[in-house]
């Protein structure tokens, strides 16, 4: 199912790798839904892993970083994935498909 909150931005890092950053800024009532979307993305990434997870500079094939920052009534959730370009693009394609 397409994400309702996360908005992805892709960046080609060259040499066949890329970064996909998703961000959502919500009020506390929507935070559980955003975190559930993040978990769905991470579950897909793990299930379709192109190799070992870890920093690319340390020999990993792909990696993910999740940040949650609260400011007053708003919470910003950021998810960054790095890995092979084809893998990340397949992830975005799968996310955009209707159930």
Image (spheres, helix red, strand yellow):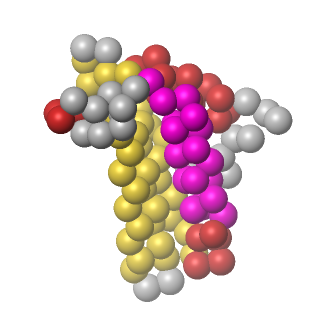
Report x, y in % for residue 37.
62, 53
Residue 86 lies in the magenta-colored region: no
Exactly how many numbered labels are in the figure? 0
Q: Work out whether residue 19 can be spotted.
A: no
Viewer-proximal residue among 39 and 2: 39
- Tell me the quarter of the picture where residue 72 sits: bottom left
Q: Residue at x 46, y 17 (%)?
A: 86
Residue 44 lies in the magenta-colored region: yes
Q: Residue at x 56, y 23 (%)?
A: 90
Report x, y in % for residue 12.
32, 23
- Tell me the quarter of the picture where residue 17 sits: top left
Quarter of the image that includes the C terminus: top right
Q: Is residue 71 left or right of residue 56?
A: right
Report x, y in % for residue 34.
60, 61
Q: Residue at x 41, y 67 (%)?
A: 68
Q: Work out whether residue 45 can be spotted.
A: yes
When the figure is inspected, residue 50 is found, relative to residue 6, above or below; the finding is above
- Tell me the quarter of the picture where residue 58 sits: top left
Span highlighted in magenta in the image: 33-50
When the figure is inspected, residue 28 is found, relative to residue 68, above or below; the finding is below
When the figure is inspected, residue 27 is found, relative to residue 92, above or below; the finding is below
Viewer-proximal residue among 42 and 7: 42
Q: Is residue 84 left or right of residue 91?
A: left
Report x, y in % for residue 33.
66, 64
């Amino acid at each position: 199912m397409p994400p309702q909150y996360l908005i992805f931005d892709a960046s080609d890092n060259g040499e066949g790798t890329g970064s996909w950053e998703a961000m959502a800024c919500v009020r506390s009532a929507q935070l559980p839904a955003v975190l559930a979307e993040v978990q769905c993305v991470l579950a897909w990434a793990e299930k379709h892993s192109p190799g070992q997870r870890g920093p690319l500079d340390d020999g990993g094939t792909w990696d993910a970083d999740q940040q949650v920052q609260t400011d007053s009534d708003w919470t910003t959730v950021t998810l960054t994935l790095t890995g092979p370009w084809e893998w990340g693009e397949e992830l975005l394609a799968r996310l955009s498909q209707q159930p």
